[in-house]
Amino acid sequence: MGACRRERRIDGGGTVSAIAPVRSRGVGGGGLGRLARRPETGSFLGLLVVFVFFAILGGKVFVGAPGWSSWLNMAADVGFIALPVGLLMIAGYLDISVGAVLPASSLTVAIVAGHYHLPVAIGIAAGLALGLLVGFVNGLLVTRTRIPSLIITIGTMFGVMGLTLGLTILIAGSTGVFIRPDAVTKSLFGGALGGMFQVSIFWWLGFVAVVYYLLHVSPWGNWVYALGGDPESARNAGISTRRLTIQLYMLSGFAAAFVGVTQVITFGSAQVAAGNSFIFNSIMCVVIGGVSLTGGAGSVIGIAFGTATFAIVNQGIFFSGLDPNLGSVIIGALLLAAVLSNDSFRALALSYAAKKK
């Protein structure tokens, strides 16, 4: 099957007359040229390089079940949040509030099911509803004001953090709450195959498939690309950009809340301070995955590759015997290399498109 890319067709009046997926053709029909122009090519090469690097240093332990489970478990958590964050970045927005939604969701589940001893299903529903509510508020503020999404989501992040801290201490009398989930809930959201591979890995892979369909198969994905490429033209084409933006933020809030649910079920406790690392980790996964910082370009497969690359570097340090302080250095260098390589592959695709005209 040929590779798909998004294209906006603009009529003489400057408005978008059609937004549809277009099958790209390789240079001279060759598959190699077509592959080189795909947005996730750079992220796949980065994934390959770092995996080989740590496989050599880490040896059999890293390439065995302990190594695979280590980075896959991490990739599942940060990757679940990175997917909707990536969609928002493709649409031209940011969401910093995920770092506050995650612990707020965890504590909501713990307080409802652990402190008040209500059914765990009610606690999970409340935690997910909280994420959807924060996402709705973010989307509403972004679409109803002229304030940049970065500032709005920073504001909601601190607001949610403050409410979470205050209400947790008021209700539970401490900054942490414990929970004892039943066996079925534990196996669905916090179990581990072979004692190593967390069930969240399968939730993440399923979410990748769902988001892939939404972005690359359904018409909804065309609207996301159009919103990031030219919001005014998208509105002129009849796309409800306000509703689409709210949907994207609600999806981001839901994803962060879901990770919060899986973590509280897995570890049996929730803490107010958890979740801050997910803010920039998810953004780094998205950028490493080839998503444009200016919006309008990116792919789900690229985000998945970027997530895996980030997780391999983080966990590979411990298997390789290198100084743990080098982890941040490697990730920083990888981020810069990803931005440079993504720009190069994007320039290659644009130059080829210009030659075909």
Image (cartoon, helix red, strand yellow):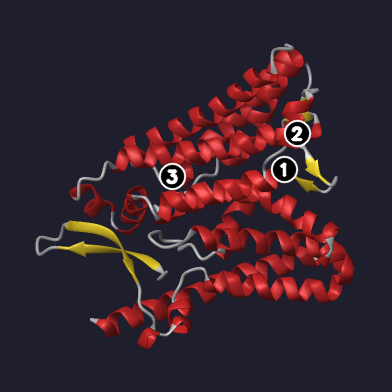
Give the percent coordinates (x, y) of residue 291. Answer: 48, 62
Q: Position of residue 286 (x, y in %)?
A: 55, 58
What secondary structure is marked by label 1?
loop
Q: Quadrant of the N terminus?
A: bottom left
| Residue located 85% across and 62% down the image | 318
**Which circle's residue, 1 or 2, is located before the other in the chain?**
2
Residue 85: x and y, percent? 51, 49
Q: CA distance from mark 1 to mark 2?
A: 8 Å
Residue type (three-letter) at the residue carrying disc 3: Ser
Q: Rate crowding at label 2 as few (under 14), some (14 to 19) or many (20 or more) other CA atoms within 10 Å.
A: some
Residue 145 visible in the displayed image: no
Question: Which numbered marker is on residue 187?
Answer: 2
Dot 3 falls on a residue whose secondary structure is helix
| Residue that label 1 marks | 199
Q: What residue is rendered at 32% in x and 35% in y?
A: 144
Q: Which numbered disc flags the more N-terminal residue, 3 or 2? A: 3
